[in-house]
Amino acid sequence: MPDRTPKTVIISGGTDGMGRATALERLARGDRVTVIGSSEAKGRALLERAGSPNLRFVRADLSSISEVERVVAGVFERHGSVDALALFANRVSAGRRETAEGLEHTFALYYLSRYLLSHRLVPLLDASPAPVVINVAGVGNTAGRIFWEDPQLTRRYGQVRAQLQAGRANDLLGVAFAEWAGSRARYVLYHPGFTRSGTGGHRNPLVRGSIRLLGRLFARPVPEAVRPIVGWIDEPPGDPLTAVDRGRPVDRSLRTLDPGEAARLAAYTERLLRDRSSRR
Ligand SMILES: NC(=O)c1ccc[n+]([C@@H]2O[C@H](COP(=O)([O-])OP(=O)(O)OC[C@H]3O[C@@H](n4cnc5c(N)ncnc54)[C@H](OP(=O)(O)O)[C@@H]3O)[C@@H](O)[C@H]2O)c1
């Protein structure tokens, strides 16, 4: 029998798309849900739609390290434990943009915010009887890589390059977390497949319209894509790391899940964070 006791759930990128659907599903089960997003208007609309005292909206730009740190501090103030952390926040950047902290925007938002939330919330996750982290990205896709010669993409930026690099970085984050974070939290890497969400991110209205049309024709409905996520929160998998691509387990010998690469990326990330602290 799945555990039906109310959970404490933190959702990054929960104001729209799959994160929003997950938030509403979990609220319907009686969970206490904190949703983080950058749009005040979307946050307010969700609060209205849910009409639940169990929902909290935190407005934050997760591409900023200091904003992620503020979010983490707020979660520690409010909760003694966290049962589930679900990571959805992402946005396509047509051109190369730097965050206030000098990092490439997609790297900072899609990968680094997830790295920080996963690691910094470990004490609260470990205080839960059955903690789980669910990172929703593109595991199983082998396109793209970490551009070790220039991870901040200062020379050859492309939106697809940036998305694929950050997607591969999330794969490696899962491997590294399960191996070395020393947490009881189960880590789930989940690729939902083409889903009827995430169409608002493109600035070009023609591209936006085409994606919407393709979505209506070929994409999975959002409730179907989030069903496994909702289930993993009830019942985390037994293994430290689970990788699922559209319902199928991902071959763990894929080069995109290589532990050596995962250790290298974790070391690069820690160096970035140390350099920033020493500059402050
Ligand atoms: N949709 C698909 O077909 C598909 C396929 C494969 C993988 N995925 C992956 O699945 C995940 C979720 O996708 P989705 O389709 O649900 O995306 P979505 O509908 O575009 O939602 C993205 C979420 O990220 C938040 N966000 C964006 N920038 C932010 C920022 N700077 N700070 C804080 N929050 C921010 C957005 O909220 P605000 O607007 O409030 O900031 C929104 O809640 C993504 O990682 C995506 O790459 C999606």
Image: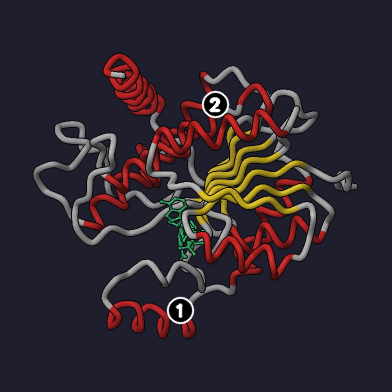
- Residue type beneath disc 2: Arg
Report x, y in % for residue 138.
44, 52
The quarter of the picture where residue 236 lies is top right
Looking at the image, which is closer to me, 135 or 10?
A: 10
Residue under label 1? 215
Task: Give the crowd class for mark 1: few <14, some 14-19, many >=20 residues within 10 Å.
Answer: some
Provide residue 271's location: percent of width, then percent of height.
Answer: 31, 19
**Tag in front: 1 or 2:** 2
Would residue 190 be visible to someone looking at this image? no
User: What secondary structure is marked by label 1?
Assistant: helix
- Give 234 or 72, whichever is nearer the viewer: 72
- Which image quarter holds the C terminus? top left
Q: Which residue appears at 71% of the width and 47% of the height?
A: 232
Q: Is mark 1 within 8 Å of ligand 1?
A: yes
At which x and y percent is residue 202? Answer: 32, 69
The residue pinned by badge 2 equals 120
Q: How many marks?
A: 2
Q: Is residue 225 above or below residue 107?
A: below
**Seen in the image, is 166 located left or right of residue 38?**
left
Distance (Cα) linking label 1 and label 2: 35 Å
In the picture as drawn, the residue positioned furthest to the left comes out as 155
